[in-house]
Image (cartoon, rainbow, N blue to C red):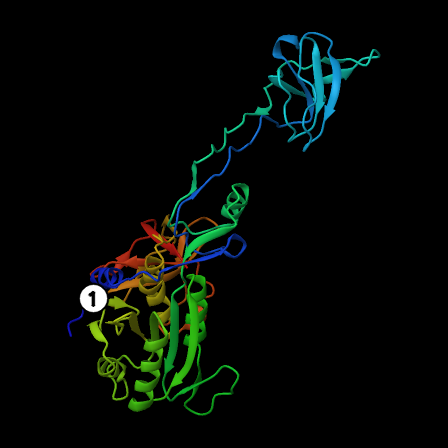
């Protein structure tokens, strides 16, 4: 199968997305879920003319007069009296402004006289009244479908009485590691062994992307064992991520096992560095990735291909956070044949510094990186001061 550009791979992946469906959850449990239906308000907000400061509610026309205080209105109380000429009510922040009043002046701008009346001594005042319905009107759309729910959205839901919310179901993502050389992190590696890092990195990335990860363990370099674990993953998941076993070695038979399991391979090599041996295929109701075994490759391919797919499946038009910043140094790469993703640090001067990076197995390079930027195929050098677009990771 021919090697394809990253752009074509991305388009192929995104166009393969299917909806995961919807479910109803408590608004309290909806954080970081994707809203799957519009939310409207069941009332005006504020629901009444509301004082925005502690002070005195009166008529503007009476500001120069000494005012009789006819009652005190606390938040949560209903005013008992309307305001007429040369009258006012002492009022607290959040309380209902009494009928007749069109202004609230602050306590700091008041003087209580021996007579018990109050005088306005300020030089200027705002009305200090939040008008009924000025924030939201009954029936207004307050949150739109397709929104990733944030803490501030929970407050909006609470304010309009939306205690049950329709969200997209979280895709179930099966994660499988492949290779005889792998042992779990709790084990001490023997000769020719390494700890399984990719699976746990991918599980964390799946969680951050808003999906539900299921780790199915290590598939040894045995075709039948690999076939059985892949068939199980396909039957239980919306998306399958297999890391390792997709290169060109004698034991890298994941692509052929995928085809045997009924997966239609759409591409198996991408003209990108790191991550060239990335495989993607489709099965009815399930999408499958074969990701490289090197941890930096699998991390970057997840962020650039898998994460956008997960969000598309949930109806969320996710866009990575990017900053356009100048290079702190001249950057040069050995081979410009492939598009490259370069891990970088953003300095205190807001310049881009490539991390000390020894290749796609150099996992300890990533924790210090603030982001990655793309270098086009054919580009070998980027000069100091040249602007690059850094994607947050």
- Residue 78 visible? The answer is yes
The reply to whether residue 293 is in sight is no
Q: How many marks?
A: 1
Q: Find residue 184 and report its horizontal and vertical position in percent.
A: 47, 83
Is 62 located above or below residue 236 in the figure?
Answer: above
Query: Of 114 and 348, which appears nearest the observer?
Result: 114
Residue 278, compared with residue 42, is above or below; it is below
Which residue is found at the position 37% from the left and 89% from the top? 180
Up-down: is 88 above or below 254?
Answer: above
Instruction: Please indicate whether residue 92 sits to the left or right of residue 116 in the image.
Output: left
| Frontmost residue, 361 versus 278 | 278
Q: Is residue 278 left or right of residue 41?
A: left
> Where's residue 225, x and y in %?
33, 89
Question: Which corner quadrant of the image does residue 345 belong to?
Answer: bottom left
- Quarter of the image for the C terminus: give it: bottom left
Q: Judge the density around disc 1: few (<14), some (14-19), many (≥20) Cα neighbours within 10 Å.
A: some
As drawn, the residue found furthest toward the right would be 114
Circle 1 sits on which residue?
337
Residue 196 is left or right of residue 262, and the answer is right
């Amino acid at each position: 199968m021919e090697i394809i550009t990253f752009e074509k791979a991305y388009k192929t992946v995104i166009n393969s997305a299917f909806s995961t469906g919807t479910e109803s959850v408590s608004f309290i449990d909806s954080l970081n879920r994707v809203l799957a239906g519009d939310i409207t308000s069941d009332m005006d907000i504020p629901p009444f003319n509301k004082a925005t400061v502690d002070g005195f509610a009166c008529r503007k026309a009476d500001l120069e007069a000494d005012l009789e205080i006819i009652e005190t209105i606390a938040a949560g109380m209903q005013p008992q009296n309307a305001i007429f000429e040369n009258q006012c009510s002492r009022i607290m922040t959040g309380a209902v402004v009494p009928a007749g009043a069109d202004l609230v002046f602050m306590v700091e701008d008041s003087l209580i006289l021996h007579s018990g009346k109050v005088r306005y001594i300020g030089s200027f005042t705002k009305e200090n009244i939040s008008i009924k319905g000025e924030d939201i009107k009954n029936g207004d759309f307050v949150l739109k479908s397709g929104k990733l729910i944030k803490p501030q959205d929970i407050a909006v839901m609470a304010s309009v009485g939306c205690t049950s919310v329709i969200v997209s179901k979280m895709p179930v993502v099966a994660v499988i590691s492949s290779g005889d050389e792998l042992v779990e992190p709790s084990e001490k590696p023997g000769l020719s062994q390494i700890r399984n890092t990719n699976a746990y990195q991918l599980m964390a990335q799946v969680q951050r992307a808003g999906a539900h990860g299921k780790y199915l363990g290590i598939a040894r370099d045995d075709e039948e064992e690999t076939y059985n674990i892949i068939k199980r993953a396909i039957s239980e998941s919306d998306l399958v991520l297999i890391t390792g076993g997709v290169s060109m070695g004698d034991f890298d038979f994941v692509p052929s096992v995928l085809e045997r399991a009924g997966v239609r391979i759409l591409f198996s090599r991408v003209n990108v560095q790191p991550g060239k041996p990335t495989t993607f295929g489709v099965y009815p109701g399930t999408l499958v990735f074969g990701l490289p075994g090197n941890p930096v490759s699998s991390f970057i391919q997840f962020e650039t291909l898998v994460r956008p797919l997960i969000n598309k499946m949930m109806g969320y038009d996710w866009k990575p956070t990017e900053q356009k910043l100048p290079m702190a140094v001249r950057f040069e790469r050995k081979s410009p044949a492939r598009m490259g993703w370069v891990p970088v640090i953003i300095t205190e001067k807001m310049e881009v510094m490539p991390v000390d990076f020894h290749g796609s197995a150099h996992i300890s390079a990533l924790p210090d990186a603030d982001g990655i930027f793309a270098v086009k195929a054919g580009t070998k050098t980027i000069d100091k001061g040249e602007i690059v677009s850094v994607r947050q990771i």
